Amino acid sequence: MVVGPMQCFLVVVLITGFIGLSRGWMREIITMAIILGSVLFLLNGGDGLLHQFFFVNMPTALHDLIFGTSTVTVSAPDPIPNPTTDYLFGLGSFAGLTGLGYLVGHRYGTAPKTSQHRLTGILPGIINGAAISYYASNTILPSTTLDLTSPSDAMTRVYLPIVLGIGLAGLILILIISRISKGGK
């Protein structure tokens, strides 16, 4: 089975729609503004500006702050492009800005008070998912497909009892811990 971009897009939109349902209108609107601004900033070369700021301007400013202004300057990073470093920095900046959007929305947005606030939070949540999917499909994972294969019958016969046994042991352990914690009170 091949999972295409449309299925991935729908999964991300559904997940962010449910997140919007749980967080409510005000929190999702704040998050949506930050995510849309971040995507617009990064698509228009913002990751290069962030790279310049963190790896050239900040070291130079710290050098001047610690040692005073002098003729010695911090050299700029290597001008030869490194695709791995650029990719990881772009991925990190996108993840950081998206996380910042959700954090700020949760911190400064008011909690939903009615079911209408929750239901209307779905719309900005879906828009957040669309923006995240758009950026990820164009920048982070361009023209990538995911190939999922189901296990064979023989593999299922071997691993299913093991998985069920581990699950049963985990359930028993949780029940024992729950019983012990209730007995202490």
Image: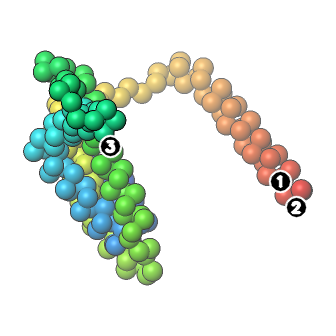
Residue 171 % position (x, y): 72, 43
Q: CA distance from mark 1 to mark 3?
A: 38 Å
Res. 181 mark = 1
Q: Quadrant of the C terminus?
A: bottom right
* Residue at horizontal 59 percent and vertical 23 percent from the top: 159
- Above or below, comparing residue 142 to residue 78 in the picture: below
Query: What residue is shown at x 86% (from left), y 50% (from top)?
Result: 180
Q: Nearer the viewer, residue 169 or 60?
A: 60
Amino acid carrying label 3: it is: Ala
Gap in Å between the C-alphas at discs 2 and 3?
43 Å
Number of marks? 3
Q: Residue at x 37, y 61 (%)?
A: 104
Residue under circle 2? 185
Q: Amino acid at mark 2?
A: Lys
The answer to whether marks 2 and 3 mark residues whose Cβ atoms lie closer than 8 Å is no
CB atoms of marks 1 and 3 within 8 Å: no
Q: Given this view, does label 1 or label 3 mark the residue nearer the observer?
A: 3
User: From what the image shows, is residue 177 above or below residue 86?
Assistant: below
x then y, percent, for residue 75: 19, 23
Residue nearest the observer in this picture, 139 or 77: 77
- Which sits earlier in the primary sequence, circle 2 or circle 3? 3
Label 2, label 1: how far apart the Cα atoms are: 7 Å
